[in-house]
Image: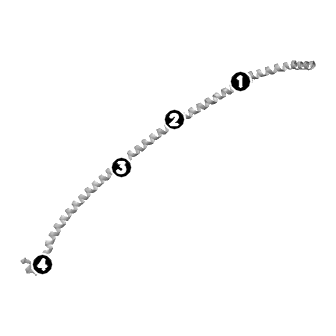
Amino acid sequence: MDEILNQLAALVLGSVPTIIFFIVLVMAYTTLVHKPLHRVLAERRARTTGAVANASAAIAAADANTRKYEDALRSARGQVYAAREERMKRWAAEREATVAAAKKVSQDRVKIARAEIETSAVAARAQVQAGAAQLSAQILKAVLPAGMAGAR
């Protein structure tokens, strides 16, 4: 049993440098690799979260700008439609004024033409009446014997 304990003590004593080397290696790994890696990953996570937050803010700002531009576009379209409507009303009023003026001119021409026709009709009646008296005298001369025509 002593021999086993001696062998075991020799093994433990021989493994002490390995254990010390392992402990130094773990401490070196923790100091040189694990902590910097953990720090870089935390920084990366923070940057990613910050980038996502920045992207969300940029999207919100873009949406706000889009709404602002859409409102401006809607307002401009409304102004264009209002100007167009005003122009159409103005053109309709001008057209109505032109039609009214043309109608008045044509009514005046009709009045003048009626007056001329009436004047011509009066002159024609007077001429027909004058010609009727003359024509009736000629008819009487032609139809009645010469002595009777003068008796009348």
Question: 96 left or right of 39?
Answer: left
Residue bearing the label numbered 1: 36
Quarter of the image containing the C terminus? bottom left
Distance, label 4 to label 3, CA atoms, is 71 Å
Q: Which callout, 1 or 3, points at the residue further toward the start of the chain?
A: 1
| Residue 64 badge | 2
Q: Tell me the residue at 20%/62% (across/down).
A: 118
Q: Which callout, 4 or 1, points at the residue further toward the start of the chain?
A: 1
| Residue 92 badge | 3
- Near mark 4 (Cα within 10 A), the count class, few <14, some 14-19 or many ≥20, is some
Distance, label 4 to label 1, CA atoms, is 151 Å
46 or 20: nearer the viewer? 20
Which structural element holds mark 4? helix
| Residue 141 badge | 4
Distance, label 1 to label 3, CA atoms, is 82 Å
78 or 139: nearer the viewer? 78
Q: Tell me the residue at 9%/78% (across/down).
A: 149
Question: 31 left or right of 72?
Answer: right
Which mark is nearer the camera, 4 or 1? Answer: 1
Distance, label 2 to label 3, CA atoms, is 41 Å
> Disc 2 marks which amino acid?
Ala
> Disc 4 marks which amino acid?
Lys
Give residue 105's quadrant in the image: bottom left
